[in-house]
Image (cartoon, grey):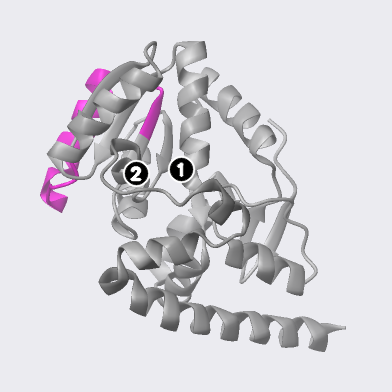
């Protein structure tokens, strides 16, 4: 399969891809049972990868890396890199649920609290009544239970697995499962389970269109996100400026 064009930002190759192109390629990967890690990259993950070599190695291995953050688009523009659009994790997840229903692909959900994952499945079956759910498991388990999860996935054999766990645990878990013979398409979706269950409200469409969804999230969860957004964005800005200087010195 031909790869997307990739742009290198902060030593990470990011797919220069639209939502439509991405869904089409993922469809082919599901049909051919090609093991795939779909990874959304944002400022927070870039920052973490700079300090955490093991996380950086997992990110570098991902078969698909899409820009899931307006900060990535802004940095790309400043660094003269072409990334056509932002593909948010929750929007991509919903597109893939559309695809799974139409194509009769089986899906599995891993992560969040049990009450959240139960409620989400109820909501999903209202919106996607033809969706075939192979199984689900909450995100409250120890590292020692990873082999048990691998066995469960081998038995249920889903074609698409959504992992709603915080970083970097979800990246490590997906990498572990892929190296232990789970031949499926994995997508890390962060807090999307909370939104799709109705536990957390998503920003109105006009806020999304203004690229201010991060601000809406900050207002909902200030204690959890204030430090990440304030200090994280300053750190990412510094990385971007350094990258620009490095690029200029090469000319």
Q: Nearer the viewer, residue 56 or 161?
A: 161
Describe the element under mark 1 as helix, strand or loop. helix
Q: Mark 2 points at which residue?
A: 195
Describe the element under mark 2 as helix, strand or loop. helix
Residue 74 placement (x, y as % from top left): 67, 68
Res 115 → quadrant: top left
Residue 187 is a magenta residue: no
Q: Which of 90 and 24 is in front in this view?
A: 90
Residue 55 visible, this orientation: yes
Q: Quadrant of the N terminus?
A: top right
Residue 159 is a magenta residue: yes
Dot 2: few (<14), some (14–19), or many (≥20) neighbours within 10 Å?
some
Give above or below for 168 relative to 40.
below
Give above or below for 247 relative to 138.
below
Q: Which residue is drawn at 44% across and 56% down?
A: 58
Q: Residue at x 30, y 56 (%)?
A: 166
Magenta-tinted stretch? 138-161
Dot 1: few (<14), some (14–19), or many (≥20) neighbours within 10 Å?
some
Q: Quadrant of the C terminus?
A: bottom right
Res 149 → quadrant: top left
Can you tell which mark lies on residue 90? 1
- Mark toward the start of the polypeptide (1 vs 2): 1
Residue 144 placement (x, y as % from top left): 11, 49
Residue 35 visible, this orientation: no
Can you tell which mark lies on residue 223? none
**Decide: marks 1, 2 in contact (CB < 8 A)?**
yes
Q: Which residue is drawn at 36% across and 36% down?
A: 162
Q: In this view, does 156 lie to the left or right of 78?
A: left
Residue 238 placement (x, y as % from top left): 58, 86
Closest to the camera, between mark 1 and mark 2, is: 2
């Amino acid at each position: 399969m031909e790869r997307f064009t990739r742009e290198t930002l902060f030593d990470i190759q990011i797919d220069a891809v639209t939502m439509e192109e991405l869904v089409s390629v993922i469809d082919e990967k599901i049909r051919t049972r090609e093991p795939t890690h779909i990874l959304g990259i944002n400022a927070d993950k870039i920052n973490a990868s700079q300090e955490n070599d093991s996380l950086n190695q997992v990110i570098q291995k991902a078969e698909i890396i899409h820009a899931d953050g307006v900060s990535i688009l802004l940095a790309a523009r400043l660094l003269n890199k072409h990334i056509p659009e932002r593909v948010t994790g929750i929007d991509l997840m919903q597109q893939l649920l559309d695809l799974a229903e139409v194509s009769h692909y089986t899906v599995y959900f891993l992560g969040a609290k049990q009450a959240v994952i139960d409620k989400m499945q109820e909501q999903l079956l209202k919106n996607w009544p033809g969706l075939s759910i192979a199984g689900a498991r909450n995100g409250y388990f120890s590292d020692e239970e990873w082999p048990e999860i691998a066995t469960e996935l081998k038995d249920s054999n889903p074609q698409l697995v959504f992992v709603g766990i915080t970083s970097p645990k979800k990246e490590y878990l997906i990498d572990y499962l892929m190296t232990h013979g789970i031949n499926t398409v994995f997508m890390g979706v962060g807090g999307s389970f909370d939104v799709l269950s109705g536990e957390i409200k998503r920003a109105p469409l006009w806020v999304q269109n203004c690229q201010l969804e991060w601000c809406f999230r900050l207002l909902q969860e200030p204690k959890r996100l204030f430090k990440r957004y304030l200090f994280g964005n300053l750190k990412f800005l510094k990385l971007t400026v350094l990258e620009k200087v490095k690029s200029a010195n090469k000319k």
